[in-house]
Amino acid sequence: MSGGGTGRAGGGAGVTPELPGAGDPKRIRTLIVDDEPLARSLLREYLAAHPDIEIVAECANGFEAVKAVAEHEPDLLFLDIQMPKLTGFEVVDLLERDVAVVFVTAYDEHALKAFDVHAIDYVLKPLEPARLARTLEHVRRLIGVPGTNARYREVAAASLPETKRPDRILIRDQAKVHVVPVEQVDYLEALDDYVCVHAGGVKHLKQQTLAELERLLDPERFVRIHRSYLLNVERLARIEPFGKDSRVAVLKSGAELPVSRAGYQRLAKLM
Amino acid sequence: MHPVFSQHGRLHIYLAAWIPVAALLAGLLAASQARTGVEAVALGLPLAMNAAFFSLALWPLCKAMPLRGDRAVTLAITHLVAALLTSSVWLLFGAGWAGALEYGARVTGAFARFRADVPLLLVVGSLLFILSSTVNYLILAFEATREAERAALELKIHARDAELRALRAQLNPHFLFNSLNAIGALAGSDAAGARRMCSLLSEFLRRTLVRGAERELPLAEEVDLADAYLGIEEVRFGDRLRVEHDVETSALDCRVPSLLLQPLVENAIAHGIAAVVEGGVIHIRARERGGRLEIEIDNPFDAEAPRRPGHGVGLGNVRERLAARHPGQSRVEARSNGDRYQVTLSLPAVRA
């Protein structure tokens, strides 16, 4: 963790910080996530000009960030996008509570487009104090507002290039993160507001709807064979008739999944 | 000039190719008149060698009159006349040689027997010269093909280089903005560090922007460029990046295409260090062995991380540029070995 250094003086060139209402004791618990130590210290320095911002921790990668969010329950996240292990978007995908986020990026064509479309707060590197102050002014209104989480997830999905599909599924388990490469997934099962990810005999619960995941994943690989099942077609061994008028998919692992009439048509189209 | 003169040793091969013709000619001469074997060879061999040189004289004519369908008649007549004329001169030489055999070497009747063979030799000579014109045209066609291939290759190299220059001109914005951000951070706490970073960045920009225009330069300059770049990244990544060199002095003055290492070094950062939490060491090695320059860059990487976009572009670019410059003589290999990723280049060691 870097010391922040020069304190208030860091506000620099004539910036008037947006002070909260006089005597307002409300502090914004803030987490800085960036893999470059210098980038963190610059942000800390500029944030020192805003007395309501309280930096509770700094993280150098996505895993640390997920853990720190659970531990410190911050109100606000400054989140770099390009980081080792987990990108900023993957971190957002794993957040299970509403936290306001300001994305920090040097340059990311797709992401910037998505931010503008979805009116998401971001600052560019090199950081600029006046721009940072304006962003803070806006983001203060989002603190504690429910539903921010869903918006960030949406923008995270939108900022992937169109041709690029996620190649792994991330599942949060308390402060731990499981990374499941999509090619290891056998099938996904809908369970109310959760999705159960079945991969090589191991099950993980992820807080997301099956429809959302279906939209993200490669339709050439994952087929909705039933209202509740999304199948990795590479795991399919055969389809057997089941009773009158219905079918069952037998996987290479021996597992059997129901196939609806519409699901069978989708499978047939792909094969 | 005829291509047999253009390369050392070709003339011998060309003349050797005429030995069977000489044998045939001698056989023909022995069969047509009552000559001894010795006389037939003594006449046939010089005639054949002479024809070999006369054939070369037809080369400029073939070059001046390229084969074209719409001029087939003119071509046929020209070559027939040329063959007859060449044959006649050739026969004059033959007559002189036969005379020399008769009066100089005392081969009785040699000249008379030659005279009797003049019509036959005129036909044989014309056929020979028409045949050599045909061979000339074959060589011309072959040369044209090779020239076209060479031009195509040249074009490819130019296209690659142009593409590279375009790539450099649009510089990696991610790198540039992050570096500026780091300079901003240093300016508050470490003024000397900020200045040093400015110098490194200027050095890097100057070298890349100017460098784009040059086609080849000594490896030493490529290594300097990589140093400037990695110097900046060392400041950005702090403890996460260390660079180690092992470049032999003899390799430093080998000439390489400009910006050969840069895409590889950038990959080592973007797909390597930047994706590994604890970072690590980037090794750059270069040496010259048996007339070949071998360069190796290896870096830590996270085998489990998803590939970032752009993976393979830089490597493909390096591979194609080397292949275009040294067809069939360069090798670019990339392999991952546990948690390290290694790229090896091997190319002919060329010095200015």
Image (cartoon, coloured by chain):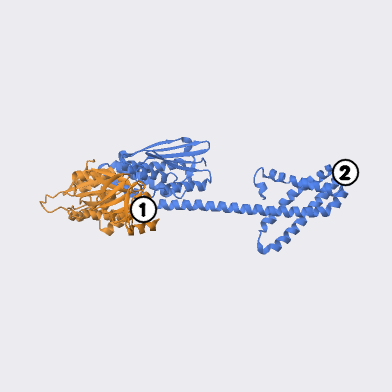
Chain colours: A orange, B blue
B98 lies left or right of B66? right
Please tell me whether mark 1 or mark 2 is closer to you in this view: 1
x and y percentages locating residue B177 in the rendered image = 32, 49
Q: Within the image, what quadrant is residue B9 found in?
A: top right
Q: Within the image, what quadrant is residue B297 found in?
A: top left
Mark 1: few/some/many CA within 10 Å (<14, 14-19, 20+) = some
A135 lies left or right of B201? left
x and y percentages locating residue A222 in the rendered image = 34, 53
Q: Nearer the viewer, residue A77 or B190?
A: A77
Outermost residue toward the right in this view? B108
| Amino acid at circle 2 | Val
> Are the two marked residues, 1 and 2, in contact with CB atoms closer than 8 angstroms?
no
- Which label number is shown at residue A240? 1
**Circle 1 sits in a helix, a strand or a loop, which is it?**
strand
| Amino acid at circle 1 | Glu
How far apart marks 1 and 2 lie (CA) works out to 103 Å
Q: Is residue B57 visible?
A: yes
**Circle 2 sits in a helix, a strand or a loop, which is it?**
loop
A144 lies left or right of B154? left
- Which label number is shown at residue B107? 2
Q: Is residue B185 visible?
A: no
Q: Are marks 1 and 2 on the same chain?
A: no
- Which label number is shown at residue A124? none
Image height of A27 relative to A260, above or below: above
